[in-house]
Amino acid sequence: MRARDWLILFAMAAAAAPAPALAQHGAALPASMREEDIFHHWLANSQEVAAWRNEIGASRFDVLTARIWPNPQLQVSGSTTVQGDPGGGRTAIGAQLAFTLPIFGQVSRRIDAAEANVHVTESNIAAALWQRASDIRHAMLDRIFADARARMLTTNLNELMAFHTIVETRARDGANSQYDVLRVDNAVATLRAALSDAEIERDRAETILLSFIADPSLHAAPISREGLGRFDGPDSEQALIHSALARRPDLELARRGIIAAEASASRWRRDSVPMPTLWIGGQVTRDVPSVVVYGGVGFALPTFDRNQGMVGHAVADADTQRMLVSALEERIRAEVSGSWVARQSATEALQRFRTEGLPLTQSMMDRAQVAYRAGAMSIADLFDAYRAIWEARLQEIALQETMVNAEADLERAAAVDSFAFAPIQSHN
């Protein structure tokens, strides 16, 4: 199972999973990293992930709050007669204790609303993790293919330097002109500039990748094409659409928003039912000693305020979320279909180029070298053959980058590798 298969489950866990040895502070980094290693670092050491996990824990305290009954109210009073016959003791001291009793289902409705909001928070964090995982993967791909271009340009430069040696030798022997040497020198300078540009692009991509991972112990991310995982989703557009509609965390967030809004409306309707207030008290008089005990029950009269505004707001929120769910479902279908077509086209283009383009270019190179050594080809023609194969190699990298980015977009759109979304599905 790939790293992203368990990233949501990892983040939902109450306790952090033990970090792999690779992620431990001070551990030496390997010469190369795998995609799984990158995600291990992110999930194990990122303070952003830790903050999201704490946010879920904090939301659960709202459920605890919903279970608590209102505090009793204690009132102490005193009176004294300043004029006239008190008809009893001139001085009186009394105390009253009042209890508000949410006995008509208010507590259960509040608990339901609080738990629904916890589920919304879980889905919101899942959506944030899903989006950040996509950002990390695209940054990873930028680093991988910038590195691939730098490696290929290094290979091309080495070949050009060997060619440069041949031309210099032939120029000294009089077989080539000094112009040929200058032409190759110019090509060497141009290729070195392209190599420097590719290395800068690789360093920039790595900086962005490290900023997304946000692991203070990770100072480099030496990942190459060999460390990239394979696309393992179903080879069916309809199956991918089904996966997306079942697993996309942004869609699940909207669905849970409906449940939370309906629970909130139910809670406010129930809170409009008058809760009885039970009170009991007593009074003690002096001069003419007496003890009086009294009690009663009070009800608020829902004459004006029946939580109409809060109920209406919650109902409107539920309707809004339903419309959002409908819009998201259509958007997801379009995203998956578009990503599916893009991946198919990119895969076919890469395969066609590898079948038809590269072999011909390599054959042209081999023939040009033989012809040049036999004196049947000019240095300009040989140089053109070199440049043709260099361009073909870089074109293959570009086509593969397009294909892999299309796969990354399809994985994100379909959420095909998000098995860990299962623990946070709707509680209908």
Image (cartoon, grey):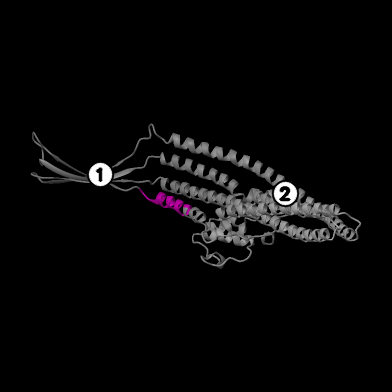
> At which x and y percent is residue 253?
56, 46
The disc at residue 295 is 1
Q: What's drawn in magenta, residue-wise?
A: 55-69
Q: Secondary structure at mark 1?
A: strand
Amino acid type indicated by mark 2:
Gln
Mark 2 or mark 1, whichever is nearer to me: 2
Magenta-span inclusion, residue 68:
yes
Q: Nearer the viewer, residue 36 or 202?
A: 202
Front residue of 135/265: it is 135
Residue 415 is situated, as x and y percent measured from the top left of the image, at: 64, 52
Q: Which mark is residue 395?
A: none
Residue 39, image quadrant = bottom right
Contact (CB < 8 A) between labels 2 and 1?
no
Residue at 52 percent across and 57 percent down: it is 46
* Mark 2, residue position: 238
In this rendering, the answer to whether 291 lies above or below 87 is: below
* First in sequence: mark 2 vs mark 1: 2
> What element does badge 2 sit on?
helix
Overall secondary structure of the magenta section = helix
The residue under the point 32% across, 43% down is 277
How dense is the environment of label 2, judged by Cα within 10 Å: few (below 14), some, or many (20 and up)?
some
The front one of 172 and 343 is 172
Q: CA distance from mark 2 to mark 1?
A: 69 Å
The quadrant of the picture occupied by the N terminus is: bottom right
The residue under the point 71% across, 44% down is 338
Q: Please state the horizontal and vertical placement of residue 139, each as a whole percent of the image.
A: 62, 52
Q: Residue 295: give x, y in percent of width and height.
A: 25, 44
User: Residue type at mark 1?
Assistant: Gly
Q: Is residue 330 left or right of residue 52?
A: right
Does residue 15 appear left or right of residue 291 in this picture?
right
The question of residue 407 being in magenta is answered with: no
Question: In the shown orientation, is residue 259 left or right of residue 329?
Answer: left
